[in-house]
Image (spheres, rainbow, N blue to C red):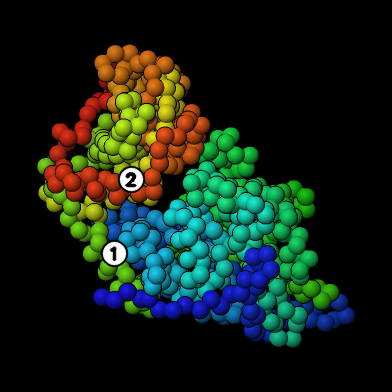
Amino acid sequence: MPLNRRKFLKRSAVTGAGVALAGTAAAPAAEAAGAGRGGKPVKRYALTVMGTTDLHGHVFNWDYFKDAEYGDAAGNAQGLARVSTLVNEVREEKGRHNTLLLDAGDTIQGTPLTYYYAKVDPITAEGGPVHPMAQAMNAIGYDAVALGNHEFNYGIETLRTFEEQCDFPLLGANALDAKTLKPAFPPYFMKTFRVKGAPPVKVAVLGLTNPGIAIWDKAYVQGRLTFPGLEEQAATWVPKLRSMGADVVVVSAHSGSSGTSSYGDQLPYVENAAANVARQVPGIDAILVGHAHQEIEELLVTNEKTGETVVLSEPLCYAERLTLFDFGLVLERGRWRVESVKASLRDAATVEDDPAITKLLADEHAEVVAYVNQVVGTATQTLTTVEARYKDAPIIDLIAKVQEDVVKAALAGTGYGSLPVLAQASPFSRTSEIPAGEVTIRDLSSLYVYDNTLVAKLMTGAQVRAYLEYSAEYFAQTAAGAPVDVARLTNAGGRPDYNYDYVSGLGYEIDIARPAGSRIRNLTFGGAPLDDAQQFVFAVNNYRANGGGAFPHVASAKELWAESTEIRTRIAEWVTAKGVLDPKDFASVDWRLTRDGTPVF
């Protein structure tokens, strides 16, 4: 079926130093309620700002990895087609001209759909397709979208092409040109609502993105873009927006609300800074929160300087929820003042897909379904990640083996070609399965759900030991003889599964009865105790190599080699070349959990 390669028209103009301006919206007459000074009626106006975040390429309620409609135990549903139905309902209830629709970033990465249009049939090719996310979001009528860190995963050219295809601005007040330190993207979006019988209402949306981009996508942005903290850029821009006449200031922030960072002290900026912005920067009415993949219906934060309440809301990721900020404005002395803000959520599972979106992207969806169902090999047995968090699973060894082989081939004949290669790999998914029999791209993609690429670093035995100790903090301390509950054994301190690493090529035990920092026991290489001075080539994904997860030593280690081909693609190539996926070619028992020397399992 032919793909949609229609020409597109940008309706939002970008002017000046990357500042997005929008047209005006006609709104109904202001509501008169009660009496003000001199018996004159008090005029009020109701405005609704809708928001999504962390869409990650989810257009339909479809799981490309399972080749089936998406479903989970909580009964959630996903996709912009569902969100479109919710948005249509809200516009019908509130009046379309009394609403704004925003997003807080991470749009063009996360599913085989987005991968396909970045790498297989790329939007950057001459005469290439219009990105499905641009098509869907244009059709739904988004007003502005903040940049997420995953917008940069495929490089600046892909992002700029996507930006050109969008009818709305991509906002990033703290995404600056590294040389001029001027905004590289529109910092804000402003819309004027014409109110009959009253002055217009001006709504400003400030977009902020994540400073961690400088670490996570260093290969693409280093020397080109810089990402200062959200707090300092909000403090610069919010007063400007107020001086420009903004009656309402909303921040769309690709930054969680916890005040924590995953990258340790590598950056002076906080990763999850949305609540900090609310506390520290006066003049903000509401913040649409993103990045953390959490559901927060309404979080009230008091500004430390004004005592005013700022309302935060984070809708669940993957288009499973839609946030509504309902603003009540009152006209006082010729200016509109925000009198009330209330946040609520609407659930995508309560509605059906919008048939307009289904029809619009049916061809693209079918193309990707056909792609992921290509058979690339045959598995001799079923491989699964169900127990991979706490047992050395062959399916994770497959990732490590592929990385080892690629790095060995890349360094062959170089000064580092004779060094032993170790590899890290993480149990990203708890449900991935490669079934016995035919193996498809879909099966392998479910094993490696991120678009990471491969890097080779130079590490010493002592550094690898420290790396393993840090990784072992993932396990909850469990006394010898105490019952072991696998549901509570992992994710200690809230550490996600993707920040726990296997390291191949070594033998070691993780003693979970011991406190964190002293758990790695009987660490060997080649059957002998590990020599702390020995040098290794460490095959590692780019997220970890650039400091993601704050693992020790790896970010500062010497880089020997790197590539732009995704690890997921390397796995598919490896399986295709082998033809048969047999654990004897990649599986090994490198580590196990123990308590006082006794195996846990």
Residue sitting at x 33%, y 58%: 112
Residue 508: percent from the left, percent from the top?
32, 21
Q: Kindly identify the residue that appears in the image at 35 percent across and 59 percent down.
A: 119
Q: Quadrant of the N terminus?
A: bottom left
Mark 1 is on which residue type?
Val
Q: Position of residue 76 (x, y in %)?
A: 37, 59
Figure check: 275 above or below 160: above
| Sequence-wise first label, 1 or 2 | 1
Q: In the figure, 37 relative to 110: above or below?
A: below
- The local secondary structure at tag 2 comes to helix
Q: Is residue 469 visible?
A: no
Task: Give the vertical position of 14 relative to 410 (above or below).
Answer: below
Looking at the image, residue 494 sits to the left or right of residue 342; the answer is left
Q: Nearer the viewer, residue 28 or 208?
A: 208
**Which residue is at 61% across, 59% downward?**
184
The residue carrying pointer 1 sits among few (fewer than 14), some (14 to 19) or many (20 or more) residues within 10 Å by Cα, namely: many
Q: CA distance from mark 1 to mark 2?
A: 19 Å
Disc number for residue 567: 2
Q: Nearer the viewer, residue 57 or 301?
A: 57
Q: Position of residue 579 (x, y in %)?
A: 14, 46
Q: Secondary structure at mark 1?
A: helix
Tally of numbered tags: 2
**In the rendered image, which quarter contains the C terminus?**
top left
Q: How far from the left and from the top, in percent, is residue 187?
A: 64, 62
Q: Quadrant of residue 414?
A: top left
Residue 578 in the figure: left or right of residue 271 = left
Looking at numbered disc 2 in the image, what kind of residue is underneath it? Ile
Residue 367, picture quadrant = bottom left
Q: Residue at x 32, y 74 (%)?
A: 3
Which residue is under mark 1? 368
**Mark 2 Cα within 10 Å, few/some/many (few <14, many 20+)?**
many
Q: Nearer the viewer, mark 1 or mark 2?
A: 2
